[in-house]
C-alpha cells in the first residue's frame, strides 16, 4: 500500500526492495548471510486453484512477477565487481504473511515452488504494485536463517545484522549504477 502512495505522490522510476529472508535450500550451497537476487517473486500462500488459477496467482496478475532484466543485469555486473567474497544467488523469492517454522509448511512451499530459494513477507506485494504501475523492480535479500532449522529463531536474531549489511551494500551499489 505504501508503494502505491509513494508512486502516486512522487515520480518513481525504479523500485529496489531489500532486506532479509529465510533460505529454502539449506542442503544446497546457500548459506546464512548469502545474498539472493530476485529473478521472480511470487506469493506462496495465496490459493484460488479451485477457480483454475495457479497457486500464488492473484486474479488479474501473473503467478510470478518477473524482475526487471536491466536491473538484474546491473546486479550481476555489481556482483562480479564488488562481491567476490559473498555468495550471491539469483532466483525465485516467495512471499507469505507469516514467519515460517513448521516442517509441513516448508514441505508444502517446496512442493508448490520447487525452484524457490528464499521466503519472506513483502516482495511479491511490492512486485504486484510495480507490475500494476509498470515500474521496473528488483529484490535483494540476505539469508538470515533457514526455516527448517530447529534453532531458527536463534539464527534469525544472531545473523540479522550481518545479513542486513550484505543486502544494504548491494542496494547502495545498485543505486550508484542507475
Image (cartoon, rainbow, N blue to C red):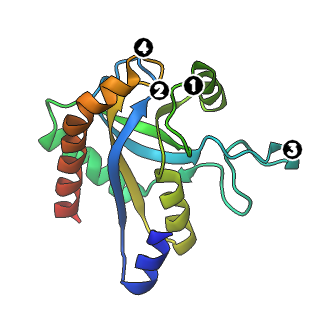
**C-alpha separation, residue under disc 1 versus residue under disc 4:** 14 Å
Of residues 109 and 66, the one drawn nearer to the viewer in this rendering: 109
Q: Earlier in the sequence, mark 3 or mark 1?
A: 3
Q: Few, some or many C-alpha atoms within 10 Å of disc 2 (few <14, some 14-19, many ≥20)?
A: many
**C-alpha separation, residue under disc 4 versus residue under disc 2:** 9 Å
**C-alpha separation, residue under disc 2 versus residue under disc 1:** 8 Å
**Which residue occupies the extreme right position in the image?**
51
Question: Is residue 56 among the parts visible in the rendering?
Answer: yes
Residue underneath mark 3: 50
Residue 117 placement: quadrant: top left
> In the figure, is residue 100 to the left or right of 138?
right
Residue underneath mark 1: 106
Query: SS for tag 3?
Result: helix
Residue underneath mark 4: 27
Residue 130 position within the rendered picture, expressed as x and y whole percent measured from the top left: 49, 66
Residue 86 position within the rendered picture, expressed as x and y whole percent measured from the top left: 19, 31
Q: Few, some or many C-alpha atoms within 10 Å of disc 1 (few <14, some 14-19, many ≥20)?
A: some
Q: Residue at x 36, y 84 (%)?
A: 10
Amino acid at each position: 500500500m505504501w508503494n502505491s502512495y509513494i508512486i502516486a505522490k512522487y515520480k518513481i522510476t525504479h523500485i529496489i526492495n531489500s532486506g532479509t529472508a529465510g533460505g529454502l535450500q539449506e542442503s544446497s550451497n546457500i548459506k546464512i548471510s548469502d545474498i539472493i537476487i530476485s529473478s521472480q517473486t511470487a506469493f506462496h500462500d495465496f490459493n484460488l486453484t479451485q477457480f483454475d488459477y495457479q497457486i500464488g496467482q492473484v486474479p488479474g496478475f501473473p503467478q510470478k512477477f518477473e524482475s526487471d532484466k536491466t536491473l538484474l543485469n546491473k546486479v550481476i555486473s555489481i556482483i562480479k565487481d564488488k562481491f567476490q567474497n559473498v555468495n550471491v544467488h539469483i532466483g525465485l523469492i516467495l512471499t507469505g504473511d507469516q514467519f515460517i517454522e513448521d516442517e509441513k509448511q516448508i514441505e508444502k512451499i517446496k512442493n508448490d515452488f520447487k525452484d524457490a530459494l528464499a521466503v519472506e513477507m513483502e516482495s511479491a506485494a511490492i512486485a504486484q504494485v510495480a507490475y500494476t504501475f509498470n515500474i521496473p523492480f528488483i529484490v535483494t535479500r540476505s539469508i538470515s536463517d533457514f526455516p527448517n532449522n530447529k534453532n531458527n529463531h536463534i539464527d534469525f536474531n544472531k545473523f540479522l545484522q550481518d545479513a542486513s549489511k550484505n543486502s544494504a551494500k548491494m542496494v547502495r551499489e545498485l543505486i550508484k549504477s542507475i
